[in-house]
Amino acid sequence: MVQIPKTPPPASPAPTRSAPTSADVARLAGVSRATVSYVLNDAGAVRISEPTRRRVREAARELGYVPHAAARSLRAGHSRMVLMPAPAFPVGPLYSQFISDLQGALGLLDYTVVQYGTAGLQDDEAARAWAELRPVAVLVPGSGLGPRGVEVLRRSGARAVVTLGPESVEGAHALLMDHDVVGHSAGAHLFDRGRRRIGVVVPREPGLEAFSAPRLAGVREALRGTDATVTELPLAHDEGAAARLAARWRDLGLDAVFTYNDEYAMLLMRALQDEGIRIPEDTAVIGADNLMLGRLLRPRLSTVHLELPSGRELAELVDRAVRDPAAAPEAHKVLGASVVRRESS
Amino acid sequence: MVQIPKTPPPASPAPTRSAPTSADVARLAGVSRATVSYVLNDAGAVRISEPTRRRVREAARELGYVPHAAARSLRAGHSRMVLMPAPAFPVGPLYSQFISDLQGALGLLDYTVVQYGTAGLQDDEAARAWAELRPVAVLVPGSGLGPRGVEVLRRSGARAVVTLGPESVEGAHALLMDHDVVGHSAGAHLFDRGRRRIGVVVPREPGLEAFSAPRLAGVREALRGTDATVTELPLAHDEGAAARLAARWRDLGLDAVFTYNDEYAMLLMRALQDEGIRIPEDTAVIGADNLMLGRLLRPRLSTVHLELPSGRELAELVDRAVRDPAAAPEAHKVLGASVVRRESS
DNA sequence: TTGAAAGCGCTACCAA
DNA sequence: TTGGTAGCGCTTTCAA
């Protein structure tokens, strides 16, 4: 890093006097703290004269008063914070978009979404860390939360715990996103296209098993009882690995491959084409996630389009659960999948 | 959404009795709240007998006691929360990775990173919302924070405010990530390769101006005083737009193009190739961000590799600033750029 | 219409 | 070695 000298060392901004409190505002406005609270929260029950209101607001503005969320929620006994663990590794545009939507939708319902950076904590440990913040609801993607974690969160006052993952957890609401439907769609599609010796790419990258295993299982399921075979193809997301796999492609004798997602499809297609294998004549290829890049490949990539729940739907589920925390946990199957056939299959 | 009936409506998990407090633990263990606090925080100054410790821990475990972060930090007068706004739109793998690293590094220094979902709040409004949480430090990417926002945060007790963006803000530390170096590298490279009529893709997507404008400016800068020309090419990230741009490519008479990043490069390359334009013979192409996909394109994509600061470096800057909040804000230029030449230029 | 004061859960000082 | 207690900043009930 290159230090850039600031021209005039700016007067250090006021020797870190601590933050103004409502008492400071009260003092400056010449009223009590209660009055300050009434004014700033637009308390309906109490009538405060207009001149007083003005004085209070003025004082607050002058001091740069910002209420202290911790104190407030301590007093109130609850908050409107919805907590999610921050993803530990880069996630695709699909999921990012989903999070954004969800944040927006929950924001409309006056919740505040907070992504908590849980670096390396495991299960119950993580649940405890989250519970310390006393969120009103917790949303957990993946399968990192067990029944004990759910229990910890509920006992600490979380009125809704929602998992987004392959299976439901005792005591928690569940948005079942079983990725086997993705594999199922892909497998059925390839079978319909007359393919019988079907490869399935399984990423070697850690953290992806949660998705890859069900997708593989879905393919198997779709082909159960047919004469088609399924071959598992472990593959790291780098060129070398793809080239090595492509080199033994003819020996594998596959006539189709489901590549886990569009990015692995691009990787593998490139390697196969460099190897002289024709797509789709020799090998049909289908990806998943319906990313933009699939349309840019040649041949254009067939893919499985994922239908995630809308942010609004999930936000409403959370809100319902918060309002009636005693209700039995709901479990919803929310992952839809549809094949987008292009040229590669 | 499809409702899946749970087989036995599970006994609603204990009529939401509220969370156990340290007083509950004390009562159960037959000690005072002070003792509970000492034991659970391993207070060094005080010696508690082993049997007592055991009783306290046992009681805490039995009740599922989790300390209340708000109460704790209210009492302590500070927290170790580092707050960042959650990105409002999907960001690339580069930035996601950076955030992850940063979270890890700050975690090692015992900070907790929280991404705050600031849906639609603007500037000062957002700053105030963040300030309510009384974070010890605030990290703000982009240019959404003005001097007033910084002031609000500092007055509310934030000991470090760090901006990650094109320019430094009065009162805040700055990690200057001026993307003009990216454009500069690209422009210089294309010039060195003998190109003189240079196009620069400018994404139409909102939210990207913060990056695209400096990248464009960098190209201009690199070519200032030469005989080369720079042509701005607005482009939306979809096939149709790319095809339309490609259709008038020959009229544009460009012999090189810097595509903003690798994804737009892929989009445009595909459209150009479909139009029969040879790369790099007719038009040289260079992207940026050095994504995996560039290596998979044919011809292989030249790109500008971005050197972001490591998470550890930034974490240490934050830590320094927190420890000495009175110190004059530092400004560091942290964005490095180097050309990775492949086949497309 | 406004103020006094209790108390949310926690920690740390001082006393026993 | 342990307990009592004040007080962090806020809201809200009760009194004036």
Image (tube, coloured by chain):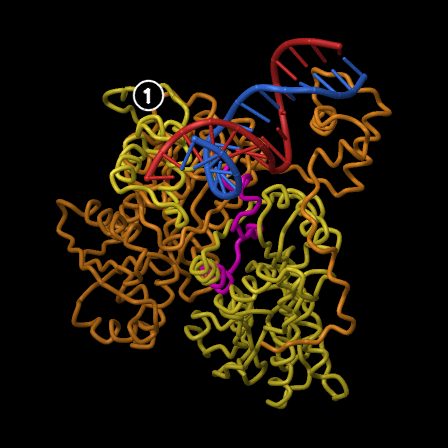
Chain colours: A yellow, B orange, C red, D blue
The one nearer the camera, B281 or B231, is B231
Residue A169 pos. (x, y %): 72, 62
Neighbours of disc 1 within 10 Å: few (<14), some (14-19), many (20+): few
Residue B43 is at least partly visible in this image: yes
A238 to A2, vertically: above or below: below
Residue located at (41% from left, 24% from top): A18
Residue B160 seen in the figure: no
**Residue A35, image x and y in percent?**
38, 36
Quadrant for the N terminus of chain B in the image = bottom right
Q: Position of residue A42 (x, y in %)?
A: 37, 47
Front-most of A256 and B214? B214
Question: Which residue in the protein does label 1 denote?
Answer: A14
Please name the amino acid that badge 1 sits on.
Ala
**Is residue A309 magenta-colored?**
no
Residue B215 lies, with reference to residue A179, above or below; the image says above
Question: What is the secondary structure assignment of the residue under circle 1?
Answer: loop
Q: Quadrant of residue B285?
A: bottom left
What segment carries the magenta color?
A71-100
Q: Residue at x 64, y 49 (%)?
A: A157
From the viewer's perspective, tell me whether residue B208 is left or right of residue A301.
left
- Residue A81 counted in the magenta span: yes
Query: Left or right: where does residue B71 sit relative to residue A153?
Result: left
The chain letter for the residue carrying disc 1 is A
Question: Quick one: A297 or A334, which is closer to the camera?
Answer: A334
Q: Residue at x 81, y 29 (%)?
A: B30
Q: Nearer the viewer, residue B260 or B326?
A: B326
For the C terminus of chain B, the quadrant is: bottom left
Which image quadrant for residue A231? bottom right
Q: Is residue B194 left or right of residue A79?
A: left
Residue B321 in picture, x, y percent from top left: 43, 26
How many numbered tags mark residues here? 1
Q: Is residue A42 above or below residue B11?
A: above
